[in-house]
Every structure is written in structure tokens, then in C-alpha cells.
Amino acid sequence: MSESRLDLLTRFPWLKEAIKSRLWQPAAMLLTLSFFVLVILTGLLGTPAGSRNFGIIFVWIVWWAVLIIVLIPFFGRLWCAVCPIPGPGEWLQRRGIISRVPGKLRSLGWRWPRPLRNIWLQNAGFLMMAMFSTIILTRPLLTGWLLLGFLLLSVLFSILFQNRVFCRYVCPVGGFIGLYSLLSPLELRVKDVAVCREHKTKDCLVGTSCSYGCPWLVYPGTLKRNAYCGLCAECVRACPKDNIGLNLRPFGSDLLVDKERRMDEAFKAFIMLSCSLLYSVVLLGPWGWLKALANMETVSGWALYATGFLVVNLLVVPGLFWLTTVLARHLSGLHASVHRLFVDHAYGLVPLGLAGWIAFSLSFIFVNGSYVIPVLSDPFGWGWDLIGTSRVAWTPLALGFLPALQVITLLVGLVFSITTLYRIAQQHSSAFAGHALVSSGDRAWWATLPTAGFATGVTLLFLWIFLG
Amino acid sequence: MRKRLLTLLPPALVALGVLFVPLDMFAATPVTRQFTVQASQFAFDPPTLRVNRGDRVVITLEATDVVHGLYLDEYDVNVRVEPGLSKQIEFVAEKTGKFRYRCSVSCGSLHPFMIGELVVMPNDAFARAVGLTLVAALAALVYLSRFPPGEA
Ligand code: SF4
Ligand SMILES: [Cu+2]
């Protein structure tokens, strides 16, 4: 373990005790599940006016804000540990909610097909949702059905497959949480890899009398990145060698893990970056015709919109970045294939992508945050007044410093991205046995010039949408 | 450490310049600008109003389908208009930058995203943000070339 890590579990014994308890996860899940049920009920039965519907306001303003501004940047996949969606299925498999029920998980035990052991399905699912996002975001009924659908699908997957196959390979939200969790300053890792190698029974994988085997099908002994660790802490409970730590570490460490970079994740990075730009243009821009297309006012109009949406996500942005890496390769003289450089450097766009999402989200959270107060008092929009606040009017908050906040967020993302792009280029140039004329640092610098330019261009585009 | 800080000093100074250099010289003589803005589900037409700082802005707001409103960020403007009638809004554009105006009367599904833009020139916030971005990107590149991470 490198010296830039601080193991919180060793540092704070009470935290270790708390995390080892079998109680916190089901307790948190039951809490989120009760909100989730209310969201589905208000979505399906409540008023069709989104701004007065608890479901819409809580999912797309409260949950989204907490997820994108707090949980993902600082705690990575922590949401996945408390998410209600996999709860019922997991409890069915385990035949229990809190304690470790002896015996195997109950499921049909199908095997997840090998070609799908990646996040392409999640990329596709996210794009599908994103194309419909304007209507999902504004129609309580659709939000209700969508979330109910997620719940039923996850139960179905728990019946067919063991463990959290749904979370790992299907859930469209899980896909981008995984990618952006590479950034977070929190990681679960083994303390000493050698201890795991020697330990033959692999309790963390198979489970013990007081813990289940890793529900995410991850082996902690070789875990290097946050992407597929759901932070459920079953392995902490299992490990008889006390070999698992929860580390505080520098932001973005996992972006530099060079052995596990893949095209599906690279595309996730492009899709997320493109979608945050597109959402900003469509939802925050002044162009009514664009909103009308996205709002499915005519099917042909929407088809046009969806096509444009896919073209930007899958062709324009990745295509431009491909050209950028061709240029980077040319300028730097790096020998790695364009394909390799393209995939690897895509991870450098992760900080900027997250910054874009935060900047976009800030604007509608501040503007529409006040809707939370009335829907608490009248969740269904039926004219109730449970806590006397149902008539509190819409009041946009603190718009004065919003642009400054967005600029700072984007600049932090940009500088972080440029640094990451440089360090990724360094990995290629240090592997380079080339001429002595150009030092490896110089090679990395020349390789970074175009990609940094790309990131700067994207930042300027965001600025133009928000302030220009 | 001193060397590193010294490398960052020039860009920091330029950044300060970008932030605080007065852009007043681009100010135009104030005039009165009349606009007719039509509100309909879920857009304002015209979508963008451009004025200069100091201009007196007169907006005639009309609703073409259902009741709409116009809330202008940071300008303390909030009016409501019934279809077939019109409302006058008048103010002096003192603050520069881009301000969104939003429908303030729940008018249907996309109501929260019914948005128009008032751009008051000179848009120095945008100009400064662009300047800062370029300075930050260049500073990062210069810094990385002088002090490559991982190579002590
Ligand atoms: S139980 Fe602990 S020591 Fe054994 S393999 Fe798992 S992490 Fe390593
Ligand atoms: Cu309206």
C-alpha cells in the first residue's frame, strides 16, 4: 500500500466496528426503500404536474443533487451500498435481511453471458434513458413506472442469477457511478496483497458463517479500482486476517491504473461528457424548438432528436477525440496504437465530465430546490397540507453566485483533467524505448497538448451555455 | 517548492488581471429597447434578448396559449400574463451578463425548463471566465512541463 493512503478503519476503530455490523446496510436500504416506495406511489398515483409531485422532486432534484455533488465525488460507489433497487432481490436470495442465513444463495443460478461481462449494456441503457430524459424528468407517471421497472427487473435478475448481476452489468445508473467512483478519495482495498495470496480459503469470496461472499463478484485481493466495488463491506466482515482497509487517498487515483482500461468504460466517459453538454443545451438553453423535439410532441420530431443525440454521443464526441489522439500520437511520436491511446486518454476526461454534470446540476438545483418544501407537505399534489408548508411558493435561490460556482467547478475539472491526461501520457512515454533526443517527459507533454486542447474546448462550450 | 510557486506566479498575476481589468471602455450609449416577448408552452419568443448596460428595457409580454409568467433572475422582475392580454415590464439593465428568464406560473410538463435569456453587454463575466479558462489550461501545461509529476 502506498504511503499516500490513510486506512480509516485502523485509524478509527469505532468505524471498523460500525462497518462490520450487519445492521447499517439493511437499515440504510430500508430507509431508502421507504422513500423509493413513496416515490413510486406518488409517481403513479399523484398529480401529473411534476413540480408538485414528490416523486419527481425527490428523485430528480434531491437524490440527484446528493448523488452527483456529494456522494459520487467524495464517496464513490457508496450510493450502491444503500440503494433500494437491489434490496428486495438480494433479501430474497439470502432469505433474510440482516443476519447471515446459513446456506447458499437461492437463485436459478444462471450464468451471465461472457460477452456481456462489461458495461456496454449499461452504456446502452443510459443512452436509452437519456434520449427520453426530458419526458421522464417531467412526467411523474413515467418516473414512477421507470423506477418500478428497475425494482422488478432487479428482482427478476436476482431470481435468475446469483449476486448483484443487475447492479454490475445492467443498471444504467450503476455504470456511471462506477466510472466516476474512480475519482473518489475513498477506496476499499486489501492492506497486504501477500496475505491474500497465502490465504487459501478466500473467505471474502465464498463467505463465512457471519458474512456473504462478495455480492459484486469482486476478489478484494486483486482489487485495484473502485469501479465494481459496491462498498458493502461483506469482505471486511469475512476477512479473518483483518486485511481489508478503507483508505482515504488522493482524488482520481484509479484513473491512473493502467492495466484495466477498456473501450466500454472509455465510451462511458464520452457518453457522460456528451450527455452533460446536451442536457445543458436542451434543458437550460432558450431554444424552445429543441425542447419541443425532446418533449416528443411529434414522434418524427423526437426520432430526429434521438438520432442527433446518438450521433453526438457515439460519433461526434468520440470521433473528435479520436482525431485528437491521432494528433497526439503524431506530435509525441509515441508508439502505442491510436486505439490504445484513445481508450487510455478517455479516462482523462472523467474529471471534466463530472465537473460538467455538477455545473449543470447546480443551476437547476438552486433554481428549483424550493419545490422540495411544498411537496413534503403535499406529496401527491392532492391538496393535503401535512406540515403546513404546501403553499410555499417557488423561490429561486442565490442566483448571484451561481455562475462563479459553475466556473470554479469547471476549472477544477479542467485542470484535474489536463493533469490526468498528462500522467496517462507519461505512462505511455515511460514505456517508450525511443531516441535520447526527446525525454519521456517531453513526449508526454506533446501528447497532452491536443487532448488538453480538447478538454479546454469542451470547457469553453460549457461556459458558453452557462454564461455566454 | 519555491520554484514551483514561482512558476505559478505569472499565471496567477494574469488571472488576477483577467478577473479585475475594467471592461468599461466597451460600454455603448444607453438607449431604450422595446421587445415583444410571446410566451407559449414551453418557450419564449424571441428566445434571447440582447441589450447594453444602462439600456432601458421595455418588454411587452404576451401569452399565446395558457397563463404564463416571467421571472427574470436577479432583476426582481416577476409578472404573470393571461392569454389574450399583455403586460409591460420596464427596467434599466444595470447588471451585465446573461440572465435567464423563466416561466413562473406552472403551465404544463416542461414548465420548469421554459427559459429565455437576457444578455446585457458587455458580458464581462463570460469574457473573464473564458480568459481564466485559457490561463488555467496554459498554466497547467507550463507547470507540467517544468515539474512533471512522478519525476522528482
Ligand atoms: S479473506 Fe482476507 S486474507 Fe483471505 S483472501 Fe480475502 S481478503 Fe485476503
Ligand atoms: Cu409557462
Image (cartoon, coloured by chain):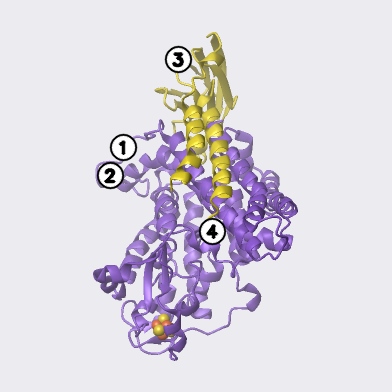
Chain colours: A purple, B yellow
Q: Position of residue B151 (x, y in %)?
A: 54, 58
Q: CA distance from mark 4 to mark 3?
A: 58 Å
Q: CA distance from mark 2 to mark 4?
A: 63 Å
- The correct choice, above or below, for A3 with respect to A292 in the image is below
Residue A391: which disc? Answer: 1
In this orientation, does residue A89 appear?
A: yes
Q: Ligand 1 is found in which quarter of the picture? A: bottom left
In the rendered structure, which amino acid carries the disc numbered 2?
Asp
Q: Residues within 10 Å of mark 2 (few under 14, many from 20)?
A: some
Identify the subunit bearing mark 2.
Answer: A
Q: CA distance from mark 3 to mark 1?
A: 29 Å
Which callout, 1 or 2, points at the residue further toward the start of the chain? 2
At 39% from the left and 23% from the top, the residue drawn is B76
Q: CA distance from mark 1 to mark 2?
A: 8 Å
Residue in front for this viewpoint, A381 or A70: A70
Which residue is the site of mark 2? A385
The answer to whether A2 appears left or right of A283 in the picture is left
In the rendered structure, which amino acid carries the disc numbered 1?
Arg
Which residue is the site of mark 3? B91
Residue B151: which disc? Answer: 4
Residue in front for this viewpoint, A219 or B115: A219
- The correct choice, above or below, for A52 with respect to A400 in the image is below
Q: Report helix, strand or loop for mark 3.
A: strand
Q: Between label 1 and label 4, give the one nearer the viewer.
A: 4
- The correct choice, above or below, for A9 with respect to B131 in the image is below
Is there CB contact under 8 Å for labels 2 and 4? no
Identify the subunit bearing mark 1.
Answer: A
Discs 1 and 4 share one subunit: no
Is there CB contact under 8 Å for labels 1 and 2? yes
Q: Between label 2 and label 4, give the one nearer the viewer.
A: 4
- The correct choice, above or below, for A94 with respect to A324 in the image is below
In the rendered structure, which amino acid carries the disc numbered 4?
Glu
